[in-house]
Amino acid sequence: MPRIEPLSPPYPASVDQALRRWMPPDVPHEPLTLFRVLHRNPELASRMFALGAGLLGHGHLPAIDREVVIARVTARAGCAYEWGVHTATLAPQAGLSPEQIRATTETHATVTAAWSPHHAALLDTVDELHDTAQLSQPVWDALCVHYEDAQLLEILVLIGWYRTISYVANGLLIEEESWGARFPAR
């Protein structure tokens, strides 16, 4: 059970409307546990929605690149909850294969062999930021070969955002969604 109890239906009208905005139309399950916990503080949830929705629905990165980054960030942070949500739904929709999804949880040497050069550059960027909170010039240069300035900025914000989401989900002990992908045993 999470450290903060998620809201349960019936929701107040304002919360119901907000939760509907956070979820794609016609999904066959309740709003995510994370969203229902965040709505214990509706003002904070509203502020978070703007950035989260903007990164998912209005970014400059191809969906597959976005999902490679999200899967790697959440895997490196050990966030089974968010990794499972994305790899069950958005990652396959973006074009990631089951092998690629699993590879996001593997060690660096295994990962880079399984990816195209631009995806390997993304993974190296996530790994270096995770390990050092810095980017070396060679990692930055490898990324710059494949992405324009607007995309480079988005990559860095995306990495930071999903690190934040991982901290929230892990800190609150949010359990994996019943329909989410299961994080591979390490």
Image (cartoon, rainbow, N blue to C red):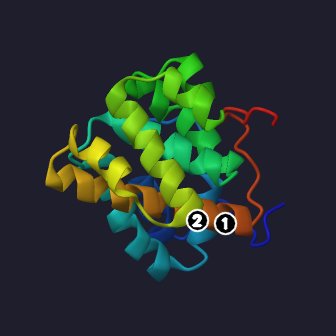
What residue lies at 57% left-to-right and 18% top-to-bottom? 98
Eyeballing the image, is 51 above or below 128? below
Q: Nearer the viewer, mark 2 or mark 1?
A: 1
Where is residue 84? Give x, y as percent: 64, 39
Q: Is residue 146 left or right of residue 166?
A: left
Where is residue 130? Give x, y as percent: 56, 58
What residue lies at 39% left-to-right and 75% top-to-bottom? 47
Numbered circles on residues, count: 2
Q: Is residue 161 left or right of residue 177?
A: left
Number of the label disc, if any, that sits on residue 11: 2
What residue lies at 29% left-to-right and 44% top-to-bottom? 143
Q: Check whether the beta carbons of the residues at disc 2 and disc 1 lie within 8 A of each other.
A: yes
What residue lies at 35% left-to-right and 27% top-to-bottom? 117
Q: Quick one: 146 or 37, which is closer to the camera?
A: 146
Q: Is residue 147 left or right of residue 23?
A: left
Eyeballing the image, is 44 above or below 173? below
Residue 75 in view, yes or no: yes
Amino acid type at circle 1 is Leu
Q: Is residue 91 left or right of residue 30?
A: left
Element carrying mark 1: loop
Amino acid type at circle 2 is Tyr
The crowding category of the residue bearing disc 2, from other C-alpha atoms within 10 Å (few below 14, some 14 to 19, many at least 20), is few
Q: Quick one: 45 or 95, which is closer to the camera?
A: 95
CA gap between label 2 and label 1 equals 7 Å
Quarter occupied by the N terminus: bottom right
